[in-house]
Amino acid sequence: MEKNLERVVDFLKQANTYYLATVEGDQPRVRPFGTAHVYDGRLYIQTGKVKEVSRQMLANPKVEICAFMKGEWIRVSGELVEDDRVEARQSMLDAYPSLQKMYAADDGNTQVFYFKNATATISAFTHEPETMSI
């Protein structure tokens, strides 16, 4: 599983932008994200508590992300769990220094989530999909 996680994070980082899908009631919501970080052996993402996406993820933690790069795309599906440890938030901010202009680990706004029960599928028109647990 560790190798799978590394492969997924490498893909997301190389793609630079992925799209996170949540739901609000019965309406899908999709927006670009850029944070993909491994902490404590889990895939983490980051947002701000003041954002609608935060409320959506807390109300329904089932999400999916998708990124496209060099003729392949990845879809990661799972449940997000908020990690409220300051160490987890700081680790994300250390990995993404540009976020430090907008966020601080103890600002009451910075929020990190990790994927639980997640699967990733890498697909292309040129090969069969490859699905892995992360």
Image (cartoon, rainbow, N blue to C red):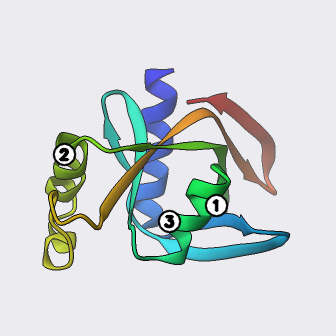
Up-down relation of residue 38 to residue 12 (above or below): above
Q: Are marks 2 and 3 in contact (CB under 8 Å)?
A: no
Q: Secondary structure at mark 2?
A: helix
Q: Which mark is residue 79?
A: none
Q: Secondary structure at mark 1?
A: strand
The answer to whether residue 41 is left or right of residue 65 is left
Packing grade of label 1 (10 A; few <14, some 14-19, many >=20) is many
Give the spatial CA distance, label 1 vs label 3.
18 Å
Q: Which mark is residue 54?
A: 3
Q: Count of labels shown?
A: 3
Give whichever of discs 2 and 3 has the lower sequence position: 3
Up-down relation of residue 128 to residue 56 (above or below): above
Mark 1 or mark 3: which is in front? 3
Q: Which residue is mark 2?
A: 86
What amino acid is at disc 1?
A: Cys
Which quadrant: the C terminus? top right
Give the spatial CA distance, label 1 vs label 2.
28 Å
The answer to whether residue 123 is left or right of residue 46 is right
Closest to the observer, 114 or 49: 49
What amino acid is at disc 2?
A: Val
Q: Position of residue 98 (x, y in %)?
A: 18, 73
Residue at the (64%, 57%) spot, across then down: 59
Mark 1 or mark 2: which is in front? 2
Q: Secondary structure at mark 3?
A: helix
Give whichever of discs 1 and 3 has the lower sequence position: 3
Residue at the (63%, 49%) spot, across then down: 61
Report if residue 67 is visible in the image: no
What amino acid is at disc 3?
A: Ser
Q: Which mark is residue 66?
A: 1
